[in-house]
Amino acid sequence: MTTILTGLVAECFDASAATPIPGDIHQLVQEALERTMHQEATRQAVSGDSEGLAALGRSITVDEGRLLESIVVALARRNGDFAVLSGMKLPVSDAALALIERNSDEGTISSLSLDPEGRSRRHYHPDLVLANRRTSEAIVIDVKRSLGGYLGGSKLSELKNRMQAAGLVLPDILWRDHQRLAVKRVSVAIIDGSRTDTDVSDGIWSLARLDELTGVPGAGVIAQSATIAYRRGICDLWARAIRDAVGSAANHIVDSADKVKPAVTIDPPQAKRPRGRPRKTTAPLRTVTVGLFRPGTSAVH
């Protein structure tokens, strides 16, 4: 069980399911657990239904990713210098992608800007954008539960290029659509919730480095502890569902036994009647008078 606090957690805490986390983060974990392990989905999975098991597995993966995104947003909002923006739709033009691919010099790329009104067939939806009002810098952030599906191919490089191409139009969009929010530099960062390496030279951040990314002390420990608490909660709810299912099955067996009809009393079997003609029995000896009937014959006694 997690302990609810109203303030930030000190950096000296080690991340675990028992590490105290702020009340609003605890609420996010509880909501994610209720969304994932709702009664009907859990019942179908525990019953052994293959579709139910597969659906529950997918739900755990998706909901943990959404939870992690919500946690990062909630933590970033603790930094008063940041304007935390989510739900943005940034155009990704072919011209922007070409500029990113041609220019490996980060300084050159950061000095370029494109017209956000230009026609674009593609768009990028960042999980959140952190715009620092004090330093006039912005960070385009993509939150992933795991980058396992991006490894071994070009998908990760394509994601980075798409994020940087979208970043080229971000300053104009922030100035135009977000109350003249001025940004002179845009960076991109990918948060990998499963990453244990603290190196960020490749633009991929672990939860342990979240303090630096958000400027919030203790953010990394809080995010790690909340993720562990979610996984522990899944295990606890799954174990409880199994116990409930086993208990229900046992009660059903007992109830069925109580409802068994009493045995029907059977009369002892009757002696079988012999087949064929009945055996002749010897008649008792008696005197019989036999003769012709004549008128006036006396009665036989």
Image: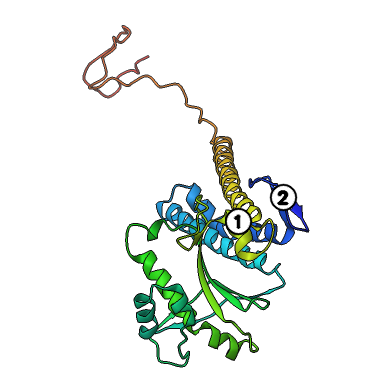
Q: Which residue is mark 1?
A: 33
Q: Is residue 152 left or right of residue 231?
A: left
Q: Quadrant of the C terminus?
A: top left
Q: Position of residue 86 (x, y in %)?
A: 58, 75
Residue 288 is tagged as: none
Which residue is rendered at x = 47% and y = 26% of the image?
266
Which residue is rendered at x = 33% and y = 17% of the image?
298
Q: Earlier in the sequence, mark 2 or mark 1?
A: 2
For disc 2, the neighbor class at 10 Å (few under 14, some 14 to 19, many from 20) is many
Q: Which residue is mark 2?
A: 20
Q: Is residue 185 above or below residue 116?
A: above
Closer to viewer: mark 2 or mark 1: 2
Q: Judge by depth and name the residue closer to the eye, 58 or 288.
A: 58
Distance (Cα) linking label 2 and label 1: 18 Å
Q: Let me know if residue 38 appears in the view.
A: no
Q: Is residue 155 above or below residue 283?
A: below
Q: Is residue 157 above or below residue 44?
A: below
Residue type at mark 1 is: Leu
Q: Position of residue 210 (x, y in %)?
A: 60, 59
Q: Quadrant of residue 218?
A: bottom right
**Which residue, as the protein is rendered here, is positioned at the far top?**
285
Badge count:
2
Q: Judge by depth and name the residue closer to the eye, 22 or 241.
A: 22
Q: Position of residue 278 (x, y in %)?
A: 27, 19
Q: Are marks 2 and 1 in contact (CB under 8 Å)?
A: no
Which residue is rendered at x = 27% and y = 13% of the image?
289
Dot 1 falls on a residue whose secondary structure is helix
Dot 2 falls on a residue whose secondary structure is loop
